[in-house]
Image: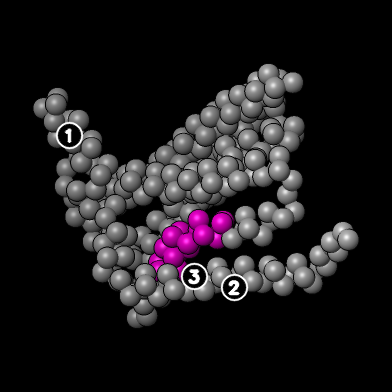
């Protein structure tokens, strides 16, 4: 006898099972991350240190030319709220836990949708989800090691007059770091999105090339929205990798079409 189709409430029950697994794993990771306060905030404050990767990298290159490219600076970070440090500790632990548990959440999503997919759809979906996870971490890492240290150093040392000292609030530092990290992680999913749309026959490379100038405007607007500081320097640093991703996506879409034609 043929199997009876799964009802709506059975789908809800199955989804609840996978959701519960994600919640339990997230809760366990959150408690572990929250308890490792010193290690957590050592990682959080590392990008603004003088020995951050990007500053060390640039200085090593500059040493070959006999110049000191980036000097050491001390930018004080202060707290202005009574309960602010505890609240920020919780927020940072939540975001860090999400970043760590993200692959497991994607895995559970794959298990949930797998029964509804055909074999050819699985061949597209599974690699796309795996590469999507990797690209998410690449975007977060790009911001952590490159974008945010430069943004913080530039804005933290910028002065309209010598008499005006810069004291960066803890909330401002954390908000900028976390928001940019998550946004860059999400934006780095663009190549995967374009690949899937090209696979479905919705997107073509010729269309992306023709609309490149409009894409640049959209990228600038998007960069202005996701940059919490709103300055031109941060806007440029965020917009540049997004534009490069757009160009890479054009190549991916063109490659996908070429392979499709060869397989016919």
Outermost residue, left direction?
66
Prevalent SS, magenta region: helix
Q: Percent position (x, y) of residue 235?
A: 46, 42
Outermost residue, bottom direction?
82
The residue to which callout 1 is attached is 60
Residue at image point 42% right, 39% down = 237
The residue to which callout 2 is attached is 20
Query: Neighbour class for label 3 at 10 Å: few (<14), some, many (≥20)?
Result: some
Callout 2: helix, strand or loop?
Answer: helix
Of residue 60 and residue 13, the one placed in the foreground of this image is: 13
Mark closest to the chain's N terminus, 1 or 2: 2
Mark nearer the viewer, 1 or 2: 2
The residue to which callout 3 is attached is 25
Q: CA separation, marks 2 and 3?
A: 9 Å
Query: Neighbour class for label 2 at 10 Å: few (<14), some, many (≥20)?
Result: few
The part of the chain drawn in magenta is 91-107
Mark closest to the chain's N terminus, 3 or 1: 3
Of residue 144 and residue 112, the one placed in the foreground of this image is: 112
**Is 7 on the left or on the right of 55, as rendered?**
right
Mark nearer the viewer, 3 or 1: 3
Callout 1: helix, strand or loop?
Answer: helix
């Amino acid at each position: 006898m043929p199997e009876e189709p799964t009802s709506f409430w059975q789908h809800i029950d199955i989804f609840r099972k996978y959701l519960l697994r994600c919640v339990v794993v997230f809760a366990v990771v959150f408690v572990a991350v929250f308890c490792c306060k010193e290690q957590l905030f050592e990682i959080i404050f590392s990008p603004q240190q003088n020995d951050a990767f990007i500053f060390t990298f640039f200085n090593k290159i500059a040493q070959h030319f006999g110049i000191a490219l980036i000097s050491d600076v001390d930018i004080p970070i202060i707290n202005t709220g009574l309960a602010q440090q505890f609240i920020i500790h919780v927020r940072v632990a939540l975001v860090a836990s999400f970043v760590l548990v993200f692959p497991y959440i994607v895995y559970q999503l794959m298990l949930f949708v797998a029964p509804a997919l055909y074999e050819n759809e699985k061949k597209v979906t599974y690699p796309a989800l795996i590469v999507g996870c990797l690209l998410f971490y690449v975007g977060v890492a790009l911001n952590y090691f490159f974008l945010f240290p430069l943004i913080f150093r530039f804005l933290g040392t910028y002065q309209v007059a010598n008499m005006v000292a810069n004291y960066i609030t803890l909330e401002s530092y954390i908000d900028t770091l976390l928001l940019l990290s998550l946004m860059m992680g999400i934006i780095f999913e663009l190549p995967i999105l374009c690949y899937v749309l090209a696979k479905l026959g919705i997107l073509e490379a010729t269309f992306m090339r023709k609309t490149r100038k409009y894409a640049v405007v959209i990228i600038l607007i998007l960069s202005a929205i996701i940059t919490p500081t709103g300055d031109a320097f941060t806007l440029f640093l965020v917009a540049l990798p997004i534009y490069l991703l757009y160009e890479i996506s054009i190549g991916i879409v063109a490659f996908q079409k070429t392979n499709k034609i060869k397989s016919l």
